[in-house]
Image: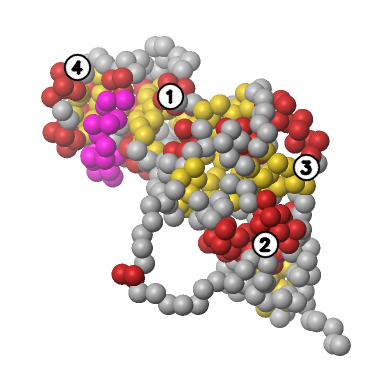
Amino acid sequence: MSKSKPIYICSECGYESPKWFGKCPGCNQWNTMNEELPNSTPLGKSNITGSSSSQIMALDDITENVEKRISTGNNEFDRVLGGGIVSGSLVLISGDPGIGKSTILLQICHHLGKNLKVLYVSGEESANQIKMRANRLGVTTNNLFILTQTDVSVIVETIKNEKPDLVIIDSIQTMVYEEVTSSAGSVTQVRECTNIFMHTAKGLGIPIIVVGHVNKDGAIAGPKVLEHIVDTVLYFEGEKNYSYRILRGVKNRFGSTNEIGVFEMTGEGLKEVLNPSLMMISGRPKNTSGTCVACVMEGTRPILAEVQGLVCATGFGTPRRMSTGFDYNRMSMLLAVLEKRAGYFFNNMDAYINVVGGLRLDEPAADLTVALALVSSLKDKAVGDNILAFGEVGLAGEIRAVSNCEQRVSEAYRLGFEKCIIPFHNYKSLTKELKINMDIVPVRNIRDAFSALVEE
């Protein structure tokens, strides 16, 4: 029997080639072509997941079943999923090491174990390690079963025999399918194992949650096809120096991808933060220049965030520009607009922007808040503690309208703010009640916004 020739597969896009390339022809990434032995069993041809129907059906003949969702008992987690875990779905949850992936899944098992049978498959930890973490988190249930196994064939056979209501795989990079000759974590193994779990979830109607590792760039390790196979992709975000974590939906076939869940890491595990706005602005300094509060939309949820700006004389020939939590290029654009349209000069000043709490503001509605924070620091004049501002700043210095203005103002009123600086074109959409209860200042350009602060 002739020896099988190796093939080279890109770890980023899955491009296959019979010879090695320094630069992948598929995604143009360098040093991503890894040597793999060809599969002894073609992908998708394994019989361990059962055969699928080959009969065609007319669209009108297909009966629409209302999707059955399983509540995890965690409101923030359910919000990101779109209301709960859908039966027969395959969910991928990923994030940096130590961010809290295994912690939150074990906490979910505590609630689901009251009425449902949960199978927790671990390829990284021993049963004793999981027991120790469960004791620390206060997880006590008789319906949680642990399986320390990496062989996909054994895992699938156990799922068929035990018929659990939920399966958790921790993690997909440790799983191995014996018919594939490559090592665990390789592109071929990850792709084949995920494909087997997908067929198992769909065929038996059992939801499966898969934990995925990330690479040094923050993307999910393994082929990009991994994200295409699963139904839902969730990312855990957060800085290690902060106790807050954000769960964000990147892909969801059963709900919106705009929702986020906010958690706080404590000694007892992850706790859901029911009021993220209050969390983000807590500890805000009083009567201090260079700080202003923004209101951004994360899905259907308005969140208040404190933006801090610092402007000081530069000690170098070229002034420094640094931004944390806000796009650097957009900050440079706002500085140019402030110089050209408003007459505030930063050409010999260092400028720094920081969003408190580790939150990242990607929405253009935060433009006006950043501009006010920079000018406040430049003039050393504090923005009032009861003032909130939002709006998109154009290159002509105009303040453009933003979406969900009424929800933003309502959130500010609920948290005790008394004055809102908003785009002029959003003023008409506000209810009469909000206009009476709050001091709403509609502005057309950045000069009007600064004038509203001077009148304060």
Which amino acid does the dot numbered 1 rest on? Asn
- Please state which of the two labelled residues, at mark 1 or mark 4, is closer to the viewer: 1
Residue located at (50% from left, 77% from top) = 54
Residue at the disc numbered 1: 275
Q: Give the alpha-carbon distance from disc 2 to disc 1, as whole Å.
A: 39 Å
Which amino acid does the dot numbered 4 rest on? Asn
Residue at the disc numbered 3: 125
User: Residue 375 versus residue 157: which sits nearer the camera?
Assistant: 157
Left or right: 312, with 109 as reference point: left
Residue located at (38% from left, 56% from top) = 65
As for residue 44 lying within the magenta part, the answer is no
Q: Quadrant of residue 347?
A: top left
Q: Dot 3: within a 10 Å radius of its alpha carbon, few (fewer than 14), some, or many (20 or more) residues? A: few
Provide the secondary structure element on which disc 4 rests: helix
Mark 2 or mark 3: which comes first in sequence? 3
Residue located at (15% from left, 28% from top) = 431
Q: Dot 1: within a 10 Å radius of its alpha carbon, few (fewer than 14), some, or many (20 or more) residues? A: few
Residue at the disc numbered 2: 193
Provide the secondary structure element on which disc 3 rests: loop
Q: Give the alpha-carbon distance from disc 2 to disc 3, as whole Å.
A: 19 Å
Provide the secondary structure element on which disc 1 rests: loop
Which amino acid does the dot numbered 3 rest on? Glu
Q: Give the alpha-carbon distance from disc 3 to disc 1, as whole Å.
A: 34 Å
Q: Position of residue 212 (x, y in %)?
A: 64, 50
- Pointer 1 with pointer 4, Cβ within 8 A: no
Q: Quadrant of residue 224?
A: bottom right
Where's the C terminus, which quadrant?
top left
- Pointer 3 with pointer 4, Cβ within 8 A: no
| Numbered circle sitting on residue 437 | 4
